[in-house]
Amino acid sequence: MARLLRALAALLVLLLAAASVAVADDGETLLEIKKSFRDGGNALYDWSGDGASPGYCSWRGVLCDNVTFAVAALNLSGLNLEGEISAAIGSLQRLVSIDLKSNGLSGQIPDEIGDCSLLETLDLSSNNLEGDIPFSMSKLKHLENLILKNNKLVGVIPSTLSQLPNLKILDLAQNKLSGEIPNLIYWNEVLQYLGLRSNSLEGSLSPDMCQLTGLWYFDVKNNSLTGAIPETIGNCTSFQVLDLSNNHLTGEIPFNIGFLQVATLSLQGNKFSGPIPSVIGLMQALAVLDLSFNELSGPIPSILGNLTYTEKLYLQGNRLTGLIPPELGNMSTLHYLELNDNLLTGFIPPDLGKLTELFELNLANNNLIGPIPENLSSCANLISFNAYGNKLNGTIPRSFHKLESLTYLNLSSNHLSGALPIEVARMRNLDTLDLSCNMITGSIPSAIGKLEHLLRLNLSKNNVAGHIPAEFGNLRSIMEIDLSYNHLSGLIPQEVGMLQNLILLKLESNNITGDVSSLIYCLSLNILNVSYNHLYGTVPTDNNFSRFSPDSFLGNPGLCGYWLHSASCTQLSNAEQMKRSSSAKASMFAAIGVGAVLLVIMLVILVVICWPHNSPVLKDVSVNKPDNLASASNNIHPKLVILHMNMALYVYDDIMRMTENLSEKYIIGYGASSTVYRCDLKNCKPIAIKKLYAHYPQSLKEFETELETVGSIKHRNLVSLQGYSLSPSGNLLFYDYMENGSLWDILHAASSKKKKLDWEARLKIALGAAQGLAYLHHECSPRIIHRDVKSKNILLDKDYEAHLADFGIAKSLCVSKTHTSTYVMGTIGYIDPEYARTSRINEKSDVYSYGIVLLELLTGKKPVDDECNLHHLILSKAAENTVMETVDQDITDTCKDLGEVKKVFQLALLCSKRQPSDRPTMHEVARVLDSLVCPAGPPPKQAQAQAQAQASEKPSTTAPSYVSEYVGLRGGGGGSALSCTNSSSASDAELFMKFGEVISRSTE
């Protein structure tokens, strides 16, 4: 017995000695690895000391074995590390997982990594690694996940990777790999995921690819593969995703492909020919079928109508002929139907109206004939309809007004006739309306001016007559108007000259008269063509007109201008002189006659005035005028109304003197409704002066009441209204001056002027804006809905603290829960779709807009840019779990914990949920952001228990993993400089459980 005890003691001593050696070696190895990194953000600040004690197990990203203290996992992902991967990493021989993704590491992958013989996961993705994939990786017999995507690796794929018996995931996408796909890889019995997209791989697809009996994901998109799809493709029964798109594959699509049970089949961008195999209509599991941009011919098989679970059908860019099968109307879950750029003939099947889930229908560039079916108006969710370049006839269906979600309508280059139906104006969400190159007659309905989201209007090359409606002035977002080659007459409305976002205006080849001086205020106008009309007068040379060439004004004999280099001005002047000379005598006799008549009239008036009579009660001629227009007739000198003491010593004349009557040199910006000037007061305190474009509000008294209300509101995150002046000479609002301009300016300025905004600053800006908006919604009396929350209305002071501007001027919300407005306010990209659809607004509409601002802060992208919608982009990225790819580089360079970024992404998507009832209040939003800016540790156990108890009482839902992250937050904090707000509306546990429940529903 004693001998046994001595043996056990000796064994224990040996184990302790081994552990101590492991402790010493691994700690020193980690410090050696750190030396090869460039850690500009000091992410590895706690990697210090001599590494001789197990303290390194608490270092950031290090996970140790509980017994031996050997390093078992190394997770340094997303820390903005640069430099190279040290060869010393091979000394950590007990490593099971290495995760260095999403850094800026360069150089080669060290051969020594093959010495980590116990490694199961190696993720080096999203770096700048170069060189070949080391052959030494074949020694990693326990490796299950090898993820090297999104680097700059070159060379061939090592065939020795087939010697990894446990490899389940092999992702080498988005590199510069070349050569052929090693045939031996196809004999790996456990491989489940093979991602090789976006390389330079060559060769053909091997018949052995179906030997991968466990493979569900096969992606070789964007390579240079050639040859045909193997006839054995039908044996790949385990495949769920097969993406062969954008290669150089040829031949016909094999019949056996119909035996696959894939959810995604993408063959687009190759050179496949022949017919679409009818057997594809039996692939019931298909969610996405993409055969676009090939050389396929023949008819569309009607059996495709059996694919009732398919959401996306892309057949565009082929040589398909025949009719559109009515059976496609049976694809009840279809979201996208793209049949454009083919040779299809016949009518548009009315059966397509049964596709009530359809988002996009593209039939452009075919040979379709006949009228547009009224049934299409049943596609209630349709967002885009493009039938450009066909031979459609008849009229535009009046029932299209039912398409409330439609944003894009292109029916150009057809044979449509009749008048433009007034019902088009009820499609409130339209941003593009293109009806050009048809035979449309009649006049332009003035109701078109109600399409306040419209960005592009093209009615060119029709037979439209009448005047340009003055209501075009209500198209506040419009960027392009093309009315050329019609029969329009009358003047260019003054209201068109007030469109501040207008970039293109084409009115050539009409019968328009008058001058062009009203367009001088379209400062954003880059393209103007008014040639071949009947315009007259002098062409301005200042402001935007200096951009336009003389060709823009050809064919208008009455136009003058020294820079047009035309003799017409001189000829016109001479003609006028001759006319005056020849009619001088007649004018003289006429003047004598008119004078005699006037004398008689004056005598009559004098008699009436002097004759005694009772004075009648006179009507106020200004009774029907706007209040300020009536006062204008009194010629009262403008007065300055002071709301705060900062401007108490100043009068209107002082302000005008200091700004030289609002000289252009004091302009600091332009908005949709105003020009903004800077004025430095005598106390050296600057103010911002906003001169409104609209001179005469409909009710001056109501407007003044709103201004008094706004002026009484004080909050550290709201821009304070200091005073105002309302007069016929201009309506001026005086605000606090913000030194760093708007958030829009910071995020979207030209690269040469762009300022860097780190993560901490962005988080504080988000919190400040949220607190300001929460104050308007919940603390003001009356409560105020902003109606136009956007990054341009979030101004930044010298310390980059956020201040919400332009609140309360439009409308204030009193007691009622909702307010119905016939005029949808807001800015494209930020407008709540539910508000746009129903015109009913409440505080949740502001919450939606705020969610879009959060996405701007996170990505640095504009809400709408080059026809790309930021919200839609993030939703698609979220569905693919790749949303972090959109994070602004300035954030990834400065954020120490990308988990915070993920939480704000989740909050932004929660704010922008489709259903207003699913969105949080701004108080709740502020509390979540507060917890990130002012962290106070994990919540007490009691709060967690309360949250779990509440969750158990509700119907069970499958919540995503990040619900626990919300529960792990704690809203609250003291009265810090950031005003970390508490709310008594709900406990922290209730708040975050609520967020978890809502987020766990569909993103929409």
Image: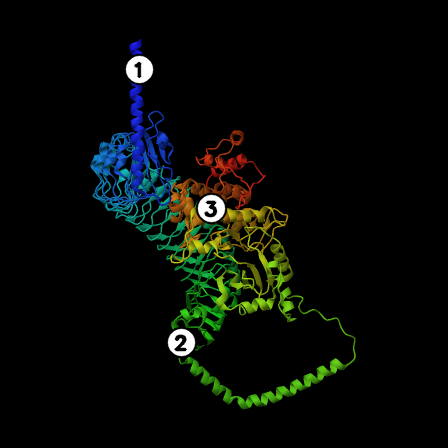
Task: Determine the CA span between mark 2 and mark 3.
Answer: 53 Å
Q: Is residue 82 left or right of residue 469?
A: left
Q: Give the total number of marks visible in the rendering.
A: 3
Farthest front residue?
50
Query: Do residues under tags 2 and 3 come within 8 Å of each other at their CB atoms?
Result: no
**Mark in front: 2 vs 3:** 3
157 above or below 323? above
Name the amino acid type tagged 2.
Answer: Leu
- Residue situated in front as seen by the camera: 238 or 864: 864
Q: Is residue 577 left or right of residue 785?
A: left
Q: Percent position (x, y) of residue 228?
A: 23, 43
**Mark in front: 2 vs 1:** 1
Task: Determine the CA span between mark 2 and mark 1.
Answer: 105 Å
Q: Is residue 715 left or right of residue 610?
A: left
Task: Evaluate whether residue 443 shows in this view.
Answer: no
Q: Secondary structure at mark 2?
A: helix
Which residue corresponds to the image point at 63% horizontal and 87% vertical from the top-left?
595
Read off the residue under disc 3.
763
Q: Work out whether mark 1 precedes mark 3 in sequence or the reverse, and give the earlier one.
A: 1
Q: Work out whether mark 2 precedes mark 3 in sequence or the reverse, and give the earlier one.
A: 2
Residue 482 lies in what quarter of the image? Answer: bottom left
- Residue situated in front as seen by the camera: 448 or 689: 689
Read off the residue under disc 2.
564
Q: Secondary structure at mark 1?
A: helix
Task: Evaluate whether residue 985 shows in this view.
Answer: yes
Q: Which mark is residue 721?
A: none
Task: Determine the CA span between mark 1 and mark 3.
Answer: 58 Å
Name the amino acid type tagged 1.
Answer: Leu
Which quadrant would the N terminus be assigned to in this image?
top left
